[in-house]
Image: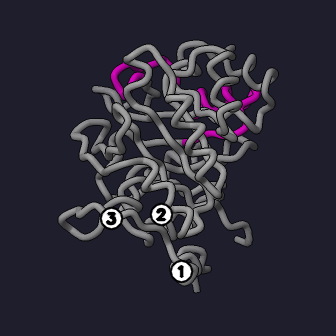
Amino acid sequence: MTYRPRIIPVLLLHDGGLVKSVQFKDYTYIGDPMNAVKIFNEMNADELIFLDITASKQGRTMSKELVRVIGEEAKMPFCAGGGIRSLDDIQHLVQAGAEKVVLGHSAASNPSFVREASRAFGSSTVSVCIDIKKDFWGREKIWSENGKLSHNYTPKEFALRMEEAGAGELVIQSIQRDGTLQGYDINSIQDIAQAVAIPVVALGGAGSLAHLHALYQKVNVNGLAAGSIFVFHGIHKGVLIQYPTINQKEVIYADSE
């Protein structure tokens, strides 16, 4: 495998501060988002994803002022998501400095909105986050509203529909692995990555650089995204913003012997 996927920290915003969740609940406060941006600048991160997890519930999008400040500070591309429901919402975030936006509930509840957004702003601006969780009967379904609302799609069906609608990228996230440090849901990610032709970013469950390496070896993805490993250190989860060094990246991207 010669292509090297981007390594992407995913930062969750909760009422203006950074938090990390476990299975979309049990939030731990991490700190100030701008401090994290400055550190990731110094560590030459490939890209950042910001998801405002309270925006939808509060009837708003991610703060345009915060997006503007991040855009002025960040040396890497970044993506903004949370509460986006209209083309005006997207325009405001892009004008403020976001290279891409992430659609979640608006895509799941109204797939035609993805088509409208991709036509208005270009597919490269529109990323769709697919949150996956098994229901009571063990069937994989997609969920929105922070994992509280289920939709009648299988993950693959929805991924194909989003590709057809013009999404430029899919973020595949396992709710049940979120924050567990047990590794990616490789089977689900592979199932979708093999079905679509657009870029796929894997998210949910990475607890070590070995987990990034394992996914890289098995699935052709365009992004290795994670939260916990970039904000916690050690078994007691002390807060520490970190990112792979050049040598650590070589380990992640190493070919199997």
Residue at point 40% right, 31% down?
Answer: 53
On screen, residue 254 versus residue 150, left or right, reads right
User: What is the spatial separation of the Cα atoms under label 2 and label 1, in whole angstroms?
Assistant: 22 Å
User: What is the spatial separation of the Cα atoms under label 1 and label 3, in whole angstroms?
Assistant: 21 Å
Q: Position of residue 150 (x, y in %)?
A: 40, 20
Q: Position of residue 171 (x, y in %)?
A: 56, 41
Q: Residues within 10 Å of mark 2 (few under 14, many from 20)?
A: some
Q: Residues within 10 Å of mark 3 (few under 14, many from 20)?
A: some
**As drawn, which residue projects farthest toward the left?**
236
Pointer 3 with pointer 2, Cβ within 8 A = no
Q: Position of residue 61 (x, y in %)?
A: 51, 23
Residue at point 53% right, 27% down?
Answer: 104
Q: Amino acid at mark 3?
A: Leu
On screen, residue 95 versus residue 224, left or right, reads right
State the extent of the magenta-drawn residues as a range: 145-171
Pointer 2 with pointer 1, Cβ within 8 A = no
Q: Is residue 154 magenta?
A: yes
Q: Secondary structure at mark 1?
A: helix
Give the foreground label among 1 and 3: 3
Pointer 1 with pointer 3, Cβ within 8 A = no
* Label disc, if present, on residue 39 of the rendered structure: 2
Q: Secondary structure at mark 3?
A: loop
Mark 2 or mark 1: whose residue is earlier in sequence:
2
Give the foreground label among 3 and 2: 2
Instruction: Name the residue nearer the viewer: 27 or 97.
Output: 97
Q: Which residue is mark 1?
A: 251
Residue 154 seen in the current view: no
Q: Amino acid at mark 2?
A: Ile
Q: Residues within 10 Å of mark 1 (few under 14, many from 20)?
A: some
Q: Secondary structure at mark 2?
A: helix
